[in-house]
Amino acid sequence: MGDKPLLDIKMLELLVCPQTKTSLEYDEANQELISKKAQLAYPVRDGVPILLVSEARVLDD
């Protein structure tokens, strides 16, 4: 893969939280997309965002 990130950052600009329709932040270290408004972390598996609420992890405050 070289220096390329696992998730295409340009694609990230197009993605929104399926629950709140707000933008997502990429947490590269944990391979997750974070929805601050929904307090959910969606997994990124092999560079593919899994934007299902049922697959998301609830964020701790």
Image: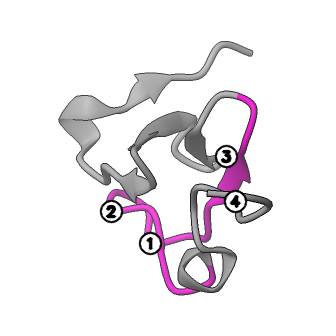
- Tell me: residue 12, above or below residue 45: below
Residue at which label 3 appears: 36
- Residue under the point 23% across and 47% down: 52
**Picture coordinates of residue 43, whole percent (x, y):** 43, 37
Q: Secondary structure at mark 2?
A: loop
- Alpha carbon separation for disc pair 1 and 2: 6 Å
**Picture coordinates of residue 39, whole percent (x, y):** 57, 35
Residue 5 is tagged as 4
Q: Amino acid at mark 2?
A: Pro
- Alpha carbon separation for disc pair 4 and 1: 24 Å
Where, by quadrant of the figure, is residue 54 drawn? Answer: top left
- Alpha carbon separation for disc pair 3 and 4: 22 Å
Q: Quadrant of the C terminus?
A: top right
Residue at which label 1 appears: 21
- Find the magenta span and give its range: 13-29
Q: Amino acid at mark 3?
A: Lys
The rendered magenta stretch, by its main secondary structure, is classed as loop
From the viewer's perspective, is 42 left or right of 25? left
Pick whichever of labels 3 and 2 is earlier in the sequence: 2
Q: Secondary structure at mark 4?
A: loop
- Tell me: residue 10, above or below residue 22: below
- Residue under the point 61% across and 70% down: 23
Residue 18 is tagged as 2
Q: Secondary structure at mark 1?
A: loop
